[in-house]
Amino acid sequence: MDVGHTAVLLLELGAVVFGLGVLGSLAGRIGLSPIPLYLLAGLAFGNGGLLPLEAPEGFFATGAEVGVVLLLLVLGLEYTAGDLVENLRRQAPVGVVDLLLNGLPGAALALLLGWGPTAALALFGVTAISSSGIISKLLTDLGRLGNRETPAVLGVLVIEDLAMAAYLPVLTGIVAATSTGDAVLSVAVALATLAAVLVVAVRHGSTVTRFVGARSNEILLLRVLGLALLVAGAAEAVHVSAAVGAFLLGIALSGEVAERIGDLLSPLRDLFAAVFFVFFGLSTDPTELSGALLPAAALAAVGIGTKLLTGWIAGRRAGVGPPGRVRAGAALIARGEFSIIIAGLVLGSVPAAFGPTVAAYVLILAVIGPLAPRLADPWARRLAARPARRTPA
Amino acid sequence: MDVEETRLPGIGLRHDLVTAQGRRVGVISQRNGARHVVLYDERDPDATAATIELTPEESEVVAELLGAPRITERLSRLREQVEGLATEGLPIEPGSPYVGATLGEAAIRTRTGASVVAVVRGEEMIASPSPDFRFQVEDRLVVVGTSDGVAAVGRLLNAH
């Protein structure tokens, strides 16, 4: 029987999206993040996977780009310029410690394996940045929003997101450049653009908000989505990276309109973020995964240790006792969307083993991340049971 | 009593305090209007023992239950504290010379020593009306002063 191209496309796409829905509900039932399951699904559907799909690849490639834009736009919507400025002032030292502690092991491994400086810079970011998405959901699910170490955890996440906004343009500039002089120039242009856009976002957020504001949800959705794609595209053109453009637009939008946009975009974000994770799986060769497992596991073990240490330092700085410091560290372990976004940016310009290593690394830590706070709880409670003289109030 | 305010980036604000009995209680105000009431662990004051999520309507009801008795308490205490202070609600009857006049024109405080602190108009309550506030029939003026002063206002308003 001759089945038309459209029919194959819709059937395959439908099967994949429905399958993701099943996987997502499965993950929810056992208290896991769906991200590792989406990645596994992508690996299974890709070339050399269990069930290679041909037709929808074009959709996934475009959808993945839209997914990145939406992930960062919605993240930016959650922050106000005030949040960012205050956090930067208060938490900058912890942020620097966090990035160095967690990023350097990644960079060291890349150099050790002889992958070159671009891969080292990329793996620095992959290992440094926790998953805001997994962690904020985790804190809500565990009822820990009220805990006194939670502001410290959220503070670290905000600093990481801000650091991303400066780091991605640098990475994009270096990847796009052909010579050292070229790289320096394109990074300088990217950072200057970033600074200019950041000033507009912080100072003139209300103008931008009024510009997109509309009473009808439909019009609001179309305007914001259109503007986000325009800003992302323009940012990509000057090597600031689409993700950062979308993030800054999210920060600029504020108030009650931002609240509504967040509600409108969240379902779209969920769909396209899933597409994004699947696409990364699709573009990773699963036959390489077994070879990448050992370095990824070693990196993950170090990554757990360094995040625990970061949490301990951030908690102590916030005046929280030892049990809270352990909880803060355990909460920070999950890596996810950002690690994949960073890896996706450099895939073409680093050795082939890079993608599978990052995939395996995120698979491990996106699974352990949500479990870690539950596992660390007995340890934290034992610390709480110790005599109070160890922790002067 | 110290209420500590903490920003939760991306979520909202948290306020918490330690009660006289040594328990820590907090309220998380989310940007979307939802509130969480948080009780902290007795052994580990950094950890939450229980969190109760309230919708905007529910938190309003709880706030009223906690706050309303205090307002009446305060009012009655105020009356006890300031002895000789009289408060009365005085109507503007039809035919009063002040229908359509402004509060400034009536010069009530200069002439009687009592003050108009609020005006009740239908369902609405206008607190601290300004001098250009214009009286209408059926307005009820809340007047505070000595009992002589308040009585003088009553005679003034409805002197035919």
Image (cartoon, helix red, strand yellow):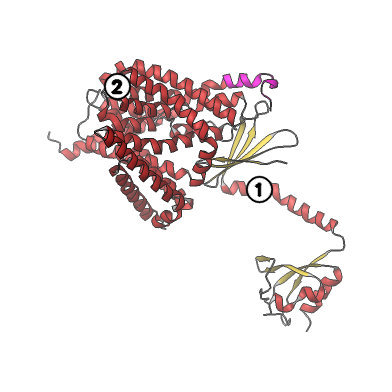
Query: Label 1, on which residue?
Result: B63
Residue B46 on image: x %, y %: 62, 30
Q: Is residue A389 magenta?
A: yes
Locate the C terminus of chain A and report the quarter of the image it occupies.
top right
- Dominant secondary-structure state across the stretch colored magenta: helix
Check the image and report above or below for A194 versus A313: below
Residue at mark 2 to residue at mark 1: CA–CA distance: 61 Å
**Which amino acid is tagged 2?**
Trp
Q: Which residue is mark 2?
A: A115
Q: At which x and y percent is residue B97?
A: 73, 82
Q: Give how far across and how far down residue B128 sits, in percent.
A: 70, 66
Helix, strand or loop at mark 2? loop
**A126 drawn magenta:** no
Residue at the image point whose x is 61% and y is 21% from the top: A381
* Residue B112 percent coordinates (x, y): 81, 74
- Please give left or right for residue A28 compared with residue B143 in the image: left
Q: Which region of the structure is painted magenta? A: A378-393
Q: Amino acid at mark 1?
A: Ala
Residue B1 visible within the image: yes
**Location of residue A100 with respect to B76 vertically, above or below:** above
Residue B80 numbered tag: none
